[in-house]
């Protein structure tokens, strides 16, 4: 169908003419939506939540590296600031959550007015002290502790270096030569107002400064690879920034635009209490000029009604939907499902999310690669009955669009040819009639 359309357009349009396209907010081949024209990779994004954190302790270089090897589209660090203004990857501001800080620095716990509790807050430790800590498994009762105590908290600079090395030196050797692939950084700015309140640390300034001074972050400011992509090729954005605070994303977007041009894709995060609130969607409408995606808690899709409503709202604002978080333990699976496989199938195929955050990268990679056309039926969270899995019809819809355009142009051509033929017939009859009138008798 595409070939037919190209042939018809080439016949109708003068040489050098182009078909005008709708205005675009950016290169679609490097956006959060994976175009349906791209068929050499899955249509959903795989985001390694804190690295391959089911397999190894979260937020460690080893967990990020394993996620890369398992085929993640993005690695996802939570970024927090040390006392001396250096960004490190850690989920909680309290270092006691997954490190040996209480053993190494037993007297360093302090009370936080913002959190209204005592903790070993990262913003009270210089980077040199943070790097002395060793990380342990967050869920010791459910996951292996064999790697506890072997890894340190990584800095943003170390993560950028790891990712740069992977994309430049390793990815080309792993993937087929016919497929372009790039793994992106999906960074969360963690609790920016907390840092501002307790230590007057401005995460947006620190973040931009660290990126702009890194020799490994050039593509995040000037993505030259994206401009050369063909319609059937896709690369993940080199950087995506997420936060629960839309005003912080707005501030970052404005700062970036002022100094560096087009900002990276921005994703607003929301818990189940947010997605049910009309005010939250009202603010998303206010922020839609800089937002590219929304990251909801999977509980927002616990019922068919809430799932449909959410997806309709996201579509209305042209936002990609990246749901969090897939964990293999049944404790974390929604009550409506027996296991993570049913849950993932429901989110990917019935709900139709555009990507998911996952801690079991290997299992989620299989689910995403499987697609929806041959997926097994999934339990509906509303009726509890077996519902048909949704086939991936994006390609069919696109072909239908091409067919409609081709049919229209073909109809125009046939009409023109018939008109020309009719006029030619009448012209010939007119000439014969004229000749008969002008014939001189002999």
Image (cartoon, rainbow, N blue to C red):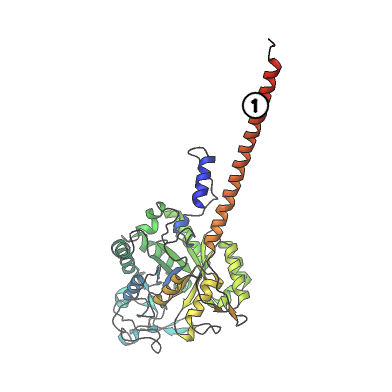
- The residue drawn where x is 67% and y is 18% is 435
Instruction: Let me know if residue 37 appears in the view.
Output: yes
- Looking at this view, name the residue that lies furthest to the bottom: 141
Q: Label 1's element?
A: helix
* Total numbered circles: 1
Indicate the quadrant where residue 427 lies.
top right
Res 217 → quadrant: bottom left
Q: Name the foreground residue: 57 vs 84.
A: 57
Q: Which of 377 and 317 is in front in this view?
A: 377
Drawn side of residue 407 relative to residue 202, left or right:
right
- As drawn, is 438 to the left or to the right of 413? right
Crowding around mark 1 (Cα neighbors within 10 Å: few <14, some 14 to 19, many 20+) is few
Q: Residue at the spot x=60%, y=37% of the render?
A: 417
Residue 318's spot in the image, x, y percent?
56, 61
> Where does label 1 land, which residue?
428
**Relative vertical location of residue 225 with respect to residue 365 in this rendering, above or below:** above
Place of residue 14 in the rendered image (x, y in percent of width and height, measured from the top left):
51, 37
| Vertical order, 231 against 123 (above or below) | above
The residue shown at (50%, 52%) is: 2
Residue 18 percent coordinates (x, y): 51, 43
Residue 9 coordinates in the image, percent (x, y): 53, 44
Residue at (63% x, 75% y) in the render: 305
The image quadrant where one finds the C terminus is top right
- Whether residue 199 is visible: no
Looking at the image, the residue that sits furthest to the front is: 442
Which of 301 and 25 lies nearest the eye of the viewer? 301
- Residue farthest toward the right in the current orientation of the protein: 437
């Amino acid at each position: 169908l595409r070939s037919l359309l190209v042939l018809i357009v080439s016949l109708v349009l003068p040489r050098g003419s182009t078909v005008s396209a709708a205005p675009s907010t950016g290169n679609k081949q490097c956006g959060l939506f994976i175009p349906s024209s791209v068929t050499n990779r899955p249509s959903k994004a795989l985001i390694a939540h804190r690295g391959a954190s089911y397999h190894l302790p979260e937020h460690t270089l080893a967990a990020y590296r394993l996620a890369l090897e398992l085929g993640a589209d993005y690695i996802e660090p939570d970024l927090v600031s040390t006392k001396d203004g250096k960004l490190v990857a850690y989920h909680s501001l309290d270092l006691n959550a997954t490190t040996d800080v209480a053993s190494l620095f037993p007297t360093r716990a302090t009370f936080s007015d913002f959190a209204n509790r005592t903790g070993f807050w990262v913003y009270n430790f210089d980077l040199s002290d943070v790097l002395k800590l060793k990380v342990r498994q967050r869920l010791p009762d459910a996951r292996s502790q064999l790697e506890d105590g072997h890894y340190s908290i990584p800095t943003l600079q170390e993560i950028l270096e790891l990712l740069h090395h992977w994309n430049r030196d390793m990815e080309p050797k792993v993937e087929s030569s016919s497929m372009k692939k790039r793994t992106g950084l999906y960074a969360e700015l963690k609790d920016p107002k907390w840092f501002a309140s307790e230590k007057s640390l401005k995460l947006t300034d620190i973040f931009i400064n660290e990126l702009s001074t890194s020799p490994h972050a050039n593509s995040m400011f000037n993505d030259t690879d994206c401009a050369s992509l063909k319609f059937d090729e896709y690369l993940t954005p080199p950087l995506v920034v997420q936060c629960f605070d839309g005003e912080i994303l707005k501030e970052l977007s404005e700062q970036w635009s002022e100094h560096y041009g087009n900002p990276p894709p921005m994703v607003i995060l929301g818990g189940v209490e947010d997605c049910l609130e009309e005010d939250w969607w009202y603010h998303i409408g206010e922020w839609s000029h800089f937002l590219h995606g929304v990251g909801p808690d999977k509980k927002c899709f616990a019922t068919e009604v809430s799932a449909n409503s959410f997806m309709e709202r996201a579509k209305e604002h042209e936002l990609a939907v990246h749901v969090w978080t897939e964990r293999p333990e049944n404790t974390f699976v929604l009550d409506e499902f027996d296991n993570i496989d049913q849950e993932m199938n429901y989110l990917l195929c019935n709900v139709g999310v555009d990507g998911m955050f996952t801690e079991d990268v290997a299992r989620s990679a299989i689910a995403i690669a499987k697609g929806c056309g041959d997926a097994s039926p999934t339990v509906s969270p509303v009726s509890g009955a077996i519902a048909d899995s949704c086939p991936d019809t994006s390609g069919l819809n696109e072909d239908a669009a091409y067919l409609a355009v081709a049919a229209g142009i073909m109809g125009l051509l046939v009409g023109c040819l018939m008109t020309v033929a009719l006029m030619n017939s009448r012209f010939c009859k007119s000439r014969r009639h004229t000749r008969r009138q002008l014939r001189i008798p002999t």
